[in-house]
Image (spheres, coloured by chain):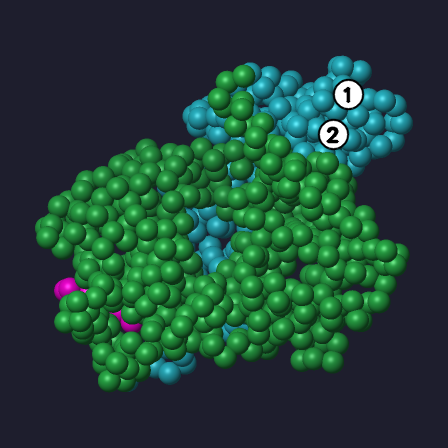
Chain colours: A cyan, B green
Amino acid sequence: MLNRLLIVAVLGCGNASAHDAAQGWADMAGLRFSSARPAFLEAVQRSPEDSRNKLGLALALWAGQPTRGPDHTRAIALLREVAMDTSSPELAAAASFIHARAIWLGGDGRTAARMLDEMILTLNSRWAEEAVVARIQLAIANRDEAELRALVARAPAWEAEMKDPVARLGLHTAMAEIYLTILGDKQQGVGHLEAAIGENASGMRVTANLLLSAGRLLGSHAPERAAHYLRRFLAENPLDGRSELAKSALADIESPIEGRP
Amino acid sequence: MNHRHGIAIVVLASVLGWALLHQVRRSDDERVVVRVAHRFLHEGIREALDEIARNFERENPGVVIEYLEVPQNLWVSWITTRLLGGNPPELINSGHLTDEQTSRFLEPLTPYLREPNPNNVGTALEGVAWRDTFVNGLNDNYNFHAQLMDYYAVPTSFNTRRFFYNRDLFRRVLGEDEPPSTYLELIEVCRLLTADARERGVSVAPIASSFLHARWLLALVHQHFTQNLAARLDSYQAGDWGLLDAMVEILRGSWQPSAEPMRSSWLTFRELGGFFQAGFLSADREQATLLFLQEKAGMLFSASWDAQMVFSGAPFDVGVFALALPEHDATATNSLRPVSETNVALGGSFSVVRTAPNWREGLDFLHFLTSQRQNQVFARHSFRLPAVIGVEPATEVRSFVPRIEGAPPGVSFDGLESFGGGMSQMVIDRNLHRLLALEDDPEVFLSIVARELPLSARQDLVRYASRLRDVIARQEVLYLARSVVSANDDPALAALREQINQQVLMLARVEATLTQS
């Protein structure tokens, strides 16, 4: 929705501001931030009330100074303005998310947490769903066990509501991190790895890691599932350097050690 | 004009002068010229590239391949001048470009890598996606641009690390030229070579080394001794526990860089270092190689990238063997296996410059260069290990073929010099002489490492987190921009979001560690 709005605005208008903005977005899509900046400055100068141009300029400025500096400050101010634009909720949601991320990366985790908490009151956009993931990630950074346990308790409800598979994947990998590395609950951790596998990640390396982790962590506790993940890892990643590791884990499962019940 | 400006002008003039001297010659017979700029100044690779170029020209009579050889120390200035000056070559060696230069000047190769390499017709790789014709399926971070989420380079070869040894010397001193197959045999060989040199009153060290060679050897020793440690600390058991994890866990106190198994690792390196030539810490790479070639050392621990030079330059019979390390640490409770070498990074890569006039023909040549038949030519002459499946390495470098079986590697400190601010590498470099001076008590070094490495790890992690924040911010911008430009139709978007979430998790892990320790 956001993208359609932007594309319509950028490509459909045919005016100079739209041309500058289109160039700016294209530059940013190619990591040419120094070129994007003047394009958006021009676009904002021509159409100062256009939230789409303001978002573009905010992003170009933020990319140049991600954590501090005058451009960072100006980017934050622009993001705040766009986030409050009630006329385009999707645009506002995207700006809110980036605003919270920028505040976190700028070093103010507490304010970022409050902003994300507000965003996730209603999971009405994919940006709100991503805010759930970001909120859990922020709690991992804080490593406050009470906060983590509170979020863990809310996770099933969020998961049930989330529609975007990429956000759900992010949720499960963050939950696996909490259980495996902080709370030390291997069973719950592997459960989230398996749920993450079910979301069919796009990145080959992500899927390969999930399959190998789940297969090796399950091991003899759930040999059939473990073998399934390990076989799938080997079938989908025949050239992965960790094939021997997977084969060895599979062999351990398939030929039980003498004396094992 | 101050001194700094003067130097800058001289450097600029040298670069421009050099660039002018190497201006592209247009083909007199109207053939399309594909210019290939590279830093491979080794004889074997030159021969390989020349033969491949002639093969290509025979099959493509309308195209001529022209190589531009650029010395390593001029590369960055030269390539920047050519890219910005609007006169770039069609193909360039990969690396050393900024993200913005990569995006602006290089052709993304991901779509081509999904299709078969047309030059593999008639081979076992016919019909196989170009990407899957490489021995690791390009499943490494060298050729893939993690920020732009595209491949911008295609490799030709890779390297492993081994000992070169002087077979003539071995035969004379040991009565046979079989290489040592265990660590104890290696130490015994070193002792016999030392005794022989002393008896003859000549200066022949058992092992030629340099600061850099020593660092490579130390990396393998650490990898070996920490294999069980890494397996124990890897909460995910995904077999890719790396340097970042190691630094985080040092700070968390999960492992100590001076306690077992690292203690055994440092002491093993000290024992090996006792057989290096005197003053090796101030020697550079070339000096160590020369020492070996001049028969002033019995062995050289290096990598396959030196094979061509060693085999062609040595006036003696050269052999190659893999480093064997102890099967237990000092506690004798942790059994250790040889470490697997399957996680190779493919290099010797080339990129296509899309602002060059004949880049499509350049892409054709890159397909040709990395086809099974031509990679065989490359491997035969260059003595590099071939990147393409089914290609046989040159007979001389068969011993460099990576070990498939074995334990996943532990902590290697490989790449520590560029991790964070490089402070941890500095701690090791600054104090290594204390470990290696046999008259010194190694406990002094171990206590320094125990005290200083956790502090430097913190400094490096602070720097690492700072860079990661910048990367995440730019990835977020890239994600939104690519969503907009593609109307959400970019196939890489989901993978990009997944990658951002992985990076944020990594940052969260580092931030938590820094806060709590």
Cα separation, mark 1 vs mark 2, equals 9 Å
Residue placed under numbered mark 1 in the picture: A43
Is B325 one of the magenta-colored residues? yes
* Res. A199 image quadrant: bottom right
Which secondary structure lies at badge 2?
helix
Camera-nearest residue between A95 and B274? B274
Locate residue A62, reporting x and y percent.
59, 26
Residue farthest along the front direction in this orientation: B201
Could you tell me what secondary structure mostly forms the magenta stretch?
loop
Q: Are marks 1 and 2 in contact (CB under 8 Å)?
A: yes
Left or right, A231 with reference to B416:
right
Left or right, A30 with reference to B244:
right
Counting residues from the N terminus, which is met first, the one under dot 1 or under dot 2? 2
Left or right, A106 with reference to B253:
right
Indicate the amino acid at tag 2: Gly
Locate residue B267, reporting x and y percent.
18, 58
Locate residue B93, reporting x and y percent.
62, 52
Q: Residues within 10 Å of mark 2 (few under 14, many from 20)?
A: many
